[in-house]
Image: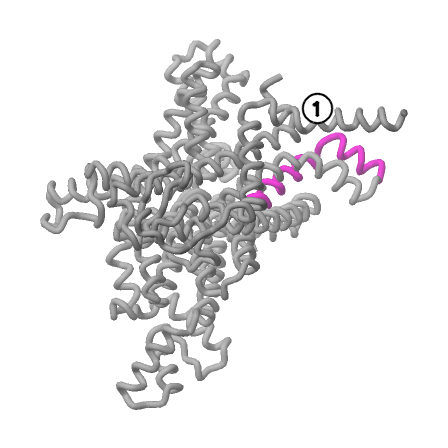
Amino acid sequence: MSFLIKNIFLRTVIIRILYALITIMISATITFFLIRNMPGDIIYALASQLAEELRIPLDEARKIVMQLYYGIDINKPQWLQYLEYIENLFRGNLGYSTYFKRPVTQVIGRFLGWTVFTLSIGISLAFAIGILIGMVAGFRRGTKLDSLITATSSILTSIPGYIIALLLYLFLSARLGLFPAQGAFSPNVEPGFNLPFIADVFYHAALPIITYVLMTFSGWALLIRSNVAKILEEDFLKYAEARGLTKMRITTSYIGKNSILPLVPLLAIRIGGMVGGSALIESIFAYPGMGYYLSLALSIRDYGLLQGIFFIMTLLTIAGVLIVEIITPLLDPRIRKEVRG
Amino acid sequence: MRSELRYQESIRNIYADYVKPIIKSSRGLFGTITIVVMILMATVGPEVVPLDLEPHPENMWCIPSLQHLFGCDYLGRDLFAMIIHGSREVFLIPFLASLIGVLIGVVLGLLGGFIGGLSRRIITALTDIWLTIPSFPAIFIMAYAFPKSYLTMVMILAVFSWPGLTRSIISEVSSLKTRDYVEAAVNLSLGRSHILFREILPHLMPYIAYNLGALYVGNMTSLIGIIFLGVAPLNVTNWGYILNTMIYTYRALLIPQATPAILIILILLIYVKLGVVYFAQSLEEVFNPRLRVYE
């Protein structure tokens, strides 16, 4: 089908959206079969509770639980159940949270914002800092500053994010008390669009954001450094210098663009890892985002919530990747040229 | 006499080609030592160091000493012994998973890159899709849902270990295919298996070596991470479980005396990860001499 569309830009977008749909289906399928595989205690516990309350047989109660909490009708054949489940997902019905006693979408709606907030700031800040530091190291190749940056960056990239988080929490929060130990804002501030609240929100988000930055900026710095080093050898730079272009012009539009653009597709891959990794970071800082509730949902055996969070995490990743994939051709003139032709 | 000479020469060649490049760089040496320490820990370690899981309240959070090299935990148990006994699970499961992942990655990458056409399209699409599934939560949920055993843990980690390598192999093979010497081999009709295994695979060794190392540390991080987050471990000495009970059950982060114990585990994790990454990087240099810097 894809070859019917001549416009390459449109074609990429359509293919990406198609991929996104397939990914959603795969992730939904995995969760569907996982729920049926989950250790049965919670469904059994809920069913027996219901059976006692309504004085109905356990089998009956089990059916009601499956229907109510997961939207699965176990009277129907499995393939029909599966189709219904998928249909429910596309209608935005993610099931029911047994712990919060309300639809999963409502529960997730309350804390999705915190994850998107910290992750988006963390990812973009890390990208910007990484580019800056990598450029410096690339231009000063072979100097002490360069080897210092390269050495620290290569050590930092090998440290797992949750260890950075634990160290930050241990020293900055638990021992020195510089940062709050939990929550997204203090209970004594008035939520709303006012300065104390916004300041408080940033104060609480600081440690998770610092963790995301420390986790990823060094990787970007190393990549930019090697890209800059490669570009500095290119002939077109000598030509640009010979043409008498200013150093600023050469740095930004010749070296900057050419070293940053190849990283944009990598950004797409990195987003997925960051969304998933937020589970550990948020539970260490007790920051009430999706990751925090993912581990909570598991420990309180709230499978409906668990499944919903996993689904939304997949959606977030796909959305991030889609945005990157669509803006890449807009940034890169080489791909834009293909689009016109 | 002659055969002995030849034998000595081949030993010397192995040393010059494989061992020297690794131990001559400080990173490679550091990595090699780490790998040796890890192997000793997981193989003879549990046989030599006795494990005592009985609580000793008088030793609660004791600081590192000659008797307790790494100090003690919240029950006064010796951390060193627990870490040694936990290392088997923590080192072996991720390693097997990464091996399987690399195997899948190489096979799919060669299929996609060498044959090209439709198979390349399908495999690329599959990797693109697989990369957007958040792997950590998926591993987390699957580890919880499936019955616990070494095999299931290995398989769960392996399922998410192949797409990165597949991607880089596809692009590498596609560019290798157009090189002169490969085209020459095609024109000489040397056969597909010769071209694949003799001409192309050796060029992929640096990627494979490096990816094996990177996957290994990634999988180790994931395994410890999910167990730290609350998935039941296979053994109570799993490092993730030691961290989990310390930090969530006994609130060690808020207890000043517990600082050495936490720091020791965290530093150990960083050390292992750094060592493996450095070893993988120096292996990459062995297979790709252009990367060597010391000469």
Q: Quadrant of residue A268?
A: top left
Please report the residue visible at 50 percent of the width from the left and 25 percent of the height from the top.
A226
Q: Quadrant of residue B5?
A: top right
Q: How is the image coloured?
A: one colour
Q: Is residue B60 magenta?
A: no
Please report the residue visible at 40 percent of the width from the left and 86 percent of the height from the top.
A59
Q: Position of residue A300 (x, y in %)?
A: 32, 65
Amino acid type at image mark 1: Ala
Q: Is residue A264 left or right of residue B193?
A: left
Q: Is residue B295 left or right of residue B67?
A: right
Q: Is residue B171 magenta?
A: yes
Q: Position of residue B215 (x, y in %)?
A: 54, 44
On the image, numbered disc 1 is attached to which residue? Answer: B16
User: For this rendering, which residue is in front, B97 or B268?
Assistant: B268
- Which residues fall within the magenta stretch? B162-189
Q: Does any portion of residue A283 appear in the rendered image?
A: no
Q: Is residue B53 left or right of residue B2?
A: left
Q: Does any portion of residue B64 appear in the rendered image?
A: yes
B239 shown above or below A157: below
User: For this rendering, which residue is in front, A5 or A233?
Assistant: A233
Please report the residue visible at 76 percent of the width from the left and 31 percent of the height from the top.
B181
